[in-house]
Image (cartoon, grey):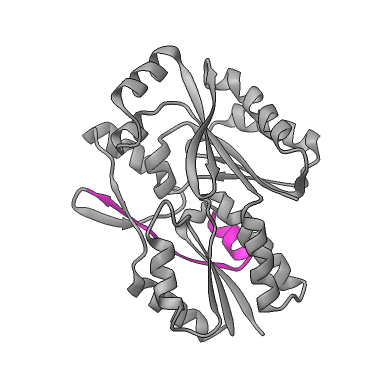
Amino acid sequence: MKIVISAESTIDIPPEMLKEYNIQTLPFGINFDDKLVDDKFGISNEIFEFVEKTKKLPKTSAVSPEQYEVHFEKLKKEYDAIIHISLSSYMSSAYNNACSIASNMENVYVLDSKSLSTGIALLAIKGKELIDAGKDFKTICEILEQAVSKVQASFVIEKLNYLYKGGRCSALTLLGTNLLKIKPQIIVKEGRMIVGRKYIGNLPKIIEKYSNDILADNKDPDLKHVFITHSSPMPEIEEKIYKLLKERGFENIHNTLAGGTISSHCGPNCIGILFINK
């Protein structure tokens, strides 16, 4: 049986990596006032410029059932089975839209990642490696289901301005965090984003503390793959995290830029570490 892995653009990995792991994607929409464009890798800077100019967030739109139908039908012409890994159902209607189409198709399985960004990518890569190892469709689906709860996805956000603009935090919370220079850790837990630790100081100063905390909290990670994912290029911070992860023993350290859907919620200078626990 020929099996393929599918995901939405919220997987946040570059085209060359999608090609390497043969992950087939379809895009969310980003609405800049009257202009609707596809979410894609590298669009985050355009979003930040739009917010700076207009003082408002672009709107994001989930993939429609009709788009999933076209996407799945196209893949079915080449593959016998599809495993589609979707953005958390608690964050978007995308999962339910995909399920509504897949329920009428044979051998199309939709997995609720209960994650976002490269948390989805970790599951997709694991799925591709299982395909390459010759595992059957049912077994791969079962293994990926079990892996969902083991994905560690967290980020540090420099400022809450974008969450405030999106109605996800109050004006009082925004004022307090900015005045005290608090950098909250956002953890994805059971499909939802919650606040973890609250770091105080400039981002370059607290990033080592955040990285060490993540590794201390997750003592038995699968060392094969880890992602450093960020909404803005931060070379010095990225290098600092890379060195810590290398020392911890991670084999493949992937450094990626967040796409439009994720960046429009977290804003610039957001950075996180993502991996799967054993």
Seen as rendered, the residue at the extreme top is 180
Picture quarter with the N terminus: bottom right
Is 26 included in the stretch rendered in magenta? yes
Seen as rendered, the residue at the extreme front is 190
Camera-side residue of 4 and 35:
4
Pinpoint residue 236: horizontal percent, then vertical percent. Answer: 61, 27
Question: How many numbered discs, if any?
Answer: 0
Compared with 119, 216 (above or below) is above
Pinpoint residue 10: horizontal percent, then vertical percent. Answer: 47, 54
Which residue: 66% across, 24% down? 208
Which residue: 43% across, 52% down? 90
Looking at the rendering, the stretch of residues picked out in magenta corresponds to: 14-32
Is 28 included in the stretch rendered in magenta? yes
Camera-side residue of 180 and 150:
150
Pinpoint residue 110: horizontal percent, then vertical percent. Answer: 52, 69
Pinpoint residue 260: horizontal percent, then vertical percent. Answer: 40, 48
Which residue: 18% across, 52% down? 34
